[in-house]
């Protein structure tokens, strides 16, 4: 989703993925968000409300890969349904993070 000047006001859900903030002078910073909402206000302002966010370059591809494998193992294991569901959510976030790091 791209936001330009005079965009129609809206509220959109954010799934796990990358938010790129483009600042003046054509500089940008990429953030990984685990989920949340983007609100476009009528005065050309955008608000991002994220559960968690961190600079994309703060993540180690090796650590993400290892954590993803662990989450998948728990999700497929013999634990409680609650543990499996939490692990599946964690795996979804790690999969999105792994995809973002591969670009």
Image: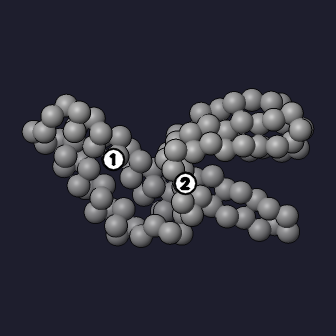
Give the number of callouts. 2
| Residue matched to label 2 | 53
- Expressed as whole percent of the image width and height from the top left, the position of residue 88 reads 30, 40
As measured in the structure, the alpha-carbon distance from the residue carrying label 2 to the one carrying label 1 is 17 Å
As drawn, which residue projects farthest toward the left? 78
The picture quadrant where one finds residue 55 is bottom right
Q: Earlier in the sequence, mark 2 or mark 1?
A: 2
On residue 14, the disc is: none
Q: Is residue 63 above or below residue 41?
A: below
Kindly tell me whether residue 93 is visible in this rendering. Answer: yes
Q: Is residue 57 above or below residue 52?
A: below
The picture quadrant where one finds residue 32 is bottom right
Local SS, label 1: helix
Residue nearest the viewer, comparing 16 with 41? 41
Q: How is the image coloured?
A: one colour
Q: Residue at 57% x, 45% y: name it.
A: 50
| Residue matched to label 1 | 91
Q: Are marks 2 and 1 in contact (CB under 8 Å)?
A: no
- Expressed as whole percent of the image width and height from the top left, the position of residue 3 reads 78, 43
Describe residue 10's horizontal placement relative to residue 88 as left or right: right
Local SS, label 2: strand
Describe residue 28's horizontal placement relative to residue 8 as left or right: left
Q: Nearer the viewer, mark 2 or mark 1?
A: 2
Q: Residue at 39% x, 50% y: name it.
A: 95
């Amino acid at each position: 989703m791209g936001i330009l000047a005079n965009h129609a006001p809206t509220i959109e859900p954010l799934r796990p993925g990358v938010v790129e903030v483009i600042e003046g002078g054509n500089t940008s910073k990429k953030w990984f968000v685990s989920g949340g909402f983007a609100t476009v206000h009528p005065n050309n302002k955008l608000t991002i409300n994220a559960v968690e966010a961190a600079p994309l370059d703060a993540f180690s591809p090796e650590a993400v890969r290892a954590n993803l494998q662990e989450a998948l193992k728990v999700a497929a294991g013999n634990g409680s349904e609650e543990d499996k569901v939490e692990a599946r959510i964690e795996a979804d976030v790690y999969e999105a993070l792994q995809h973002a790091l591969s670009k």
